[in-house]
Amino acid sequence: DTEVTQTPKHLVMGMTNKKSLKCEQHMGHRAMYWYKQKAKKPPELMFVYSYEKLSINESVPSRFSPECPNSSLLNLHLHALQPEDSALYLCASSQVLRAQRGYTFGSGTRLTVV
Amino acid sequence: QQQVKQSPQSLIVQKGGISIINCAYENTAFDYFPWYQQFPGKGPALLIAIRPDVSEKKEGRFTISFNKSAKQFSLHIMDSQPGDSATYFCAASKIQGAQKLVFGQGTRLTINP
């Protein structure tokens, strides 16, 4: 299995809603990432988990809350989002010790905040 | 120092031609330079990557050229095909550990039939 699976593919939520994005991989990768991508822009790193521990937080607002319950799963909990948070949210995974095989990205969750 | 600069922003190439995209980096600590291909509605997919100890790497129609002294690297797509039409991102990172990928701004490539 060489895939990163993200659910849901599309999500529309109101500014007062609470929702979660899910990411799963079975490649044995111990590093997992959340990226945010706006239209016609490159992905921007949000969070990095290494061995299920949060290792990098790129000063992301607290309305985004990541969680890594085990080595295969990564969640992003969303609460009180703003319309400007609408974007494609990408999950990725990689080996930790040597990332030379590259990050594997999922197809993303297209989030619209209304 | 974390920036990766990519050019051109957009590129139109005739079918069968050579597509060339260039990137420059600042941080000499970077030692892993991948290229990603992204189609609309999809996540980026790793195309090819290079380490700074080699000057060129070729995989099929895709070649990375790397100039360590100039801190530049480029992607060449030979015999470009309409199916290559996509957005291409160069990136840079350190290879050890769970590291941040620093992306270039992207190049929208269109191959005309």
Image (spheres, rainbow, N blue to C red):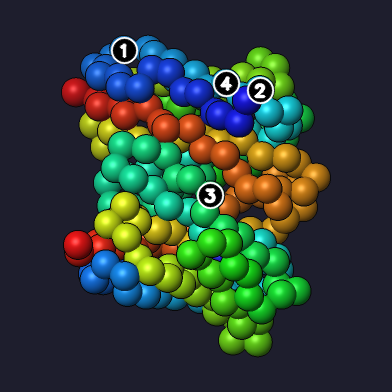
SS for dot 1: loop
**Do callouts 1 and 3 mark residues in contact (Cβ within 8 Å)?**
no
Report the residue marked by disc 1. A17
**Do callouts 2 and 3 mark residues in contact (Cβ within 8 Å)?**
no
Q: What's the CA distance linking mark 1 and mark 3?
A: 34 Å
Name the residue located 42 percent from the left edge and 70 percent from the top edge.
Answer: B78
Report the residue marked by disc 2. A26
Q: Chain of mark 3?
A: B
Q: What's the CA distance linking mark 3 and mark 4?
A: 18 Å
Q: What's the CA distance linking mark 4 and mark 2?
A: 7 Å
Report the residue marked by disc 4. A24
**Do callouts 4 and 2 mark residues in contact (Cβ within 8 Å)?**
yes
Q: Which mark is residue B46?
A: 3
Q: Chain of mark 4?
A: A
Question: Residue A61 at what x, y percent from top left?
Answer: 45, 34
Q: Is there one chain holding both mark 2 and mark 3? A: no
